[in-house]
Image (tube, grey):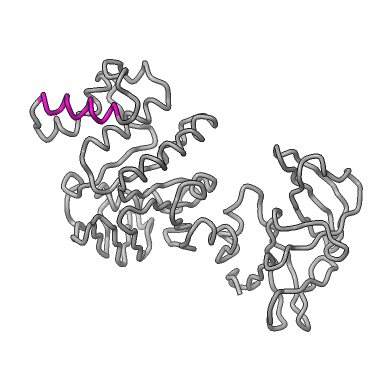
């Protein structure tokens, strides 16, 4: 068993910056877990705190049921893959993979055998004598993963390992990493600022901001029901519509329209959240003038200029784009309208 448990973990730098703030988190054994958030939110610091590269200022870190809070990184049974892969340029692929065993003073034959076996499993068998400069970005990433695998670690920590790859390689690497993690059953914590990566790969996601977790849940939960307006703004390839509104007499008044909130809500000012994907043309709803149409491939993003200076976006299938200047009325699909407290930004 190699689950991870953090209890009240804070990481405070000498200059007083609180990068991780009293955080509680449990990652299940064998889970693919994503830490997601914008730059500076504390996700990489948290990953390095799990690894032991940063010392927790308070709280405890447990791996596999054992308290490792004060243990050195080398005895925590974790392997880490960095954003820049951190390969030694003067070493061959085989030497890079076997380097952790060299540090442990393993016999040379054992190092060579482990490097060959691990490389074969990652499609690197024919590249063992090459150096990093002779490899593509995707191959370098696999060498970094192979080096981590050679450590026989119980936990794999990934710090934005796909960010240096081009778009096509990134898609291929996502599939490869997910399959590898599933086959090995390794507990994996994956740091990324790319919400598409987190949604595609993770079993669960923690969305972070200012050293704290804003929402914890499955990719579907986080996408469909963001816990607050920060998460709603951050998650989704097209931004969620967040519109000023008022609940009055059981209806939501927004942009000159009256919508059904889908349940009882007290009269109060609110922020309406509707994903562009969940809006459709309807006889009644929010009416606006088409101002922009953006081609996204199989769909297009349509921007409507609506009453009360409100802008609304919706996606439509290809070849169904309305002409710019036309008037369109749209409504949310049943159950897809979310209400957020105007003061706290929390989902009501």
Residue 282 coordinates in the image, percent (x, y): 84, 61
What residue span does the magenta drawing correspond to? Answer: 108-120
Where does residue 241 sit, x and y in percent of width and height?
A: 70, 58
Q: Residue furthest front?
A: 183
Residue 253: x, y in percent? 79, 73
Residue 262 is drawn in which quadrant?
bottom right
Q: Is residue 271 above or below residue 304?
A: below
Left or right of 204? Residue 253 is right
Residue at screen point 82% across, 59% down:
330
Residue 138 image-quadrant placement = top left
Relative placement, left or right, of 105 versus 161 is left
Residue 214 versus residue 49 in the image, above or below:
below
113 or 169, which is in the foreground? 113
The residue under the point 8% across, 28% down is 107
* Of residues 44 and 320, the one drawn nearer to the viewer in this rendering: 320
Quadrant where the C terminus lies? Answer: bottom right
Q: Residue at x 31, y 18 (%)?
A: 127
Viewer-proximal residue among 29 and 342: 29
The rendered magenta stretch, by its main secondary structure, is classed as: helix
| Residue 314 lies in the magenta stretch | no
Residue 85 vs residue 331, the one in the foreground: 331
Residue at the (17%, 26%) spot, across then down: 113
Q: Position of residue 247 (x, y in %)?
A: 74, 78
The answer to whether residue 279 is above or below residue 154 is: below
């Amino acid at each position: 068993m190699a689950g991870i448990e953090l209890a009240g973990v804070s990481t405070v730098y000498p200059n007083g910056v609180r990068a991780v703030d009293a955080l509680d988190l449990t990652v299940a054994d064998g889970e693919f877990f994503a830490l997601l958030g914008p730059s500076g939110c504390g996700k990489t610091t948290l990953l390095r705190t799990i690894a032991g590269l940063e010392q927790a200022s308070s709280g405890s870190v447990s791996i596999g049921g054992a308290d490792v809070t004060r243990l050195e990184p080398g005895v925590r049974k974790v392997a880490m893959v960095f954003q820049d892969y951190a390969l030694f340029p003067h070493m061959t692929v085989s030497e890079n993979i076997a380097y952790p065993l060299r540090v442990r003073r393993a016999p040379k034959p054992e190092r060579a055998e482990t490097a060959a076996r691990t490389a074969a499993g990652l499609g690197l068998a024919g590249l063992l004598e090459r150096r990093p400069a002779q490899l593509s970005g995707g191959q370098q990433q696999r060498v970094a993963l192979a080096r981590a695998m050679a450590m026989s670690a119980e936990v794999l920590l990934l710090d934005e390992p796909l960010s240096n790859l081009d778009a096509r390689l990134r898609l291929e690497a996502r599939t490869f990493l997910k399959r590898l993690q599933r086959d090995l059953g390794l507990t994996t914590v994956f740091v990324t600022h790319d919400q598409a990566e987190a949604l595609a790969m993770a079993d669960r996601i923690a969305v972070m901001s200012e050293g704290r977790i804003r929402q914890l849940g499955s990719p579907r939960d986080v996408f469909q029901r963001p816990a607050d307006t920060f998460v709603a703004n951050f998650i989704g390839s097209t931004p969620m519509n967040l519109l000023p509104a008022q609940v009055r007499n059981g209806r939501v008044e927004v942009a000159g329209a009256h919508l059904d909130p889908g349940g009882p809500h007290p009269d109060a000012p609110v922020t309406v959240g509707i994903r562009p994907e969940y809006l459709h043309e309807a006889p009644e709803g929010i009416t606006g003038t088409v101002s922009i149409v953006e081609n996204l491939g199989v769909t297009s993003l349509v921007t409507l200029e609506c009453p009360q200076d409100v802008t609304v976006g919706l996606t439509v299938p290809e070849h169904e784009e309305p002409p710019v200047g036309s008037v369109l009325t749209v409504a949310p699909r049943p159950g897809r309208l979310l209400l957020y407290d105007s003061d706290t930004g929390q989902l009501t």
